[in-house]
Image (cartoon, grey):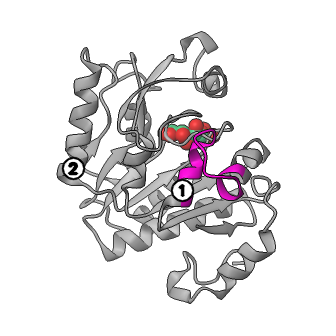
Amino acid sequence: MQVVLAGSPAEVGRLAAARIAQLIRSKPDAVLGLATGSSPLASYAELAAQVREHGLDCTGLSAFALDEYVGLPANHPQSYRSVLEKEVVRPLAIRPERVHVPDGAAADVAAACAAYERALADDGPVDLQILGIGGNGHIGFNEPTSSFASRTRIKTLTPKTRADNARFFASADEVPTHCLTQGLATICAARELVLVAQGEAKAAAVAAMVEGPVSSMCPGSALQLHPRATVIVDPAAAARLTLTDYYRYTYDQLPAWQRFDPAGPGSGR
Ligand code: F6R
């Protein structure tokens, strides 16, 4: 796992966007894995700026969402389909027919999950999966004790996750109790994982994910088993890591082509 210590939340977004843009330029028909929530928003905004100002062409991409709430109609403003359309699909001009989201409104949830896995098998694998992490260590909506072998399925959101996500809804009661989420094995089938985390509320989960034991109590620790996983954190999210000098050193030693940003974080650029 490569840990990248960014100097600020904005730099987290810029570095993740730089890696995604690098991929899109080298592989215009890449398959992107998209997370929702607030963590990747700065990266999406930076990519949108590159589309507008530097002609980054995203029209050949396809995309797979990590998860979706159960029971919200697809056009509900907080459905992950709606959020991704607003934050990613329209600003990046990705073709809507190439964007896959689990069908959280399906009458037959098991069939919807199986269909999602089939679509991933047909159009995947995901080249680069962008991830956030919950304060309890979840990735996607794989809450603590999720199986490392899990595939797309229905999960019950923990009270903490519902409380954390209440900020997006008019009231806490409106947050759905269930979601469809890619499983940990589904996520880890992506060729590359890039997880972004900002703020002190993520510090304990980041430390457990990076330096703790591989454990279903911290689903993010599944990244330790992936051959190409990068975690980009701001100083607050990095606050409980113990090997920060080493992470800085290893990043500084990388050849320029392996860095997301040849100038490197903390270079002042
Ligand atoms: C969202 C997702 C979740 C979030 C996590 C962090 O698609 O899969 O794992 O990444 O809950 O949420 P934020 O970024 O809002 O703190």
- Residue 214 drawn at (x, y percent): 61, 51
Residue 252 on image: x %, y %: 68, 84
| Residue nearest the observer in this picture, 174 or 180 | 180
Q: Residue 125: say if magenta.
A: no
Indicate the amino acid at tag 1.
Leu
Quick check: 134 left or right of 178? right
Q: Residue at 54% across / 43% down in the picture?
A: 139
**Which residue in the protein does label 1 denote?**
223
Q: Amino acid at mark 2?
A: Ala
Q: Is residue 257 above or below residue 195?
A: below
In this view, 220 is above or below 261:
above
The one of 220 and 200 positioned closer to us in this rendering? 220
- Residue at left offset 73%, top offset 53%: 207
Q: Is residue 219 magenta?
A: yes
* Location of residue 217 with respect to 268 vertically, above or below: above
Q: Which corner quadrant of the figure contains ligand 1?
A: top right
Residue under label 2: 121
Give, as a single range, the part of the protein colored magenta.
208-224
Tell me the SS state at disc 2. helix
Quarter of the figure that contains the C terminus: bottom right
What is the tally of numbered marks visible in this picture?
2
Image point (47%, 67%), residue name: 227
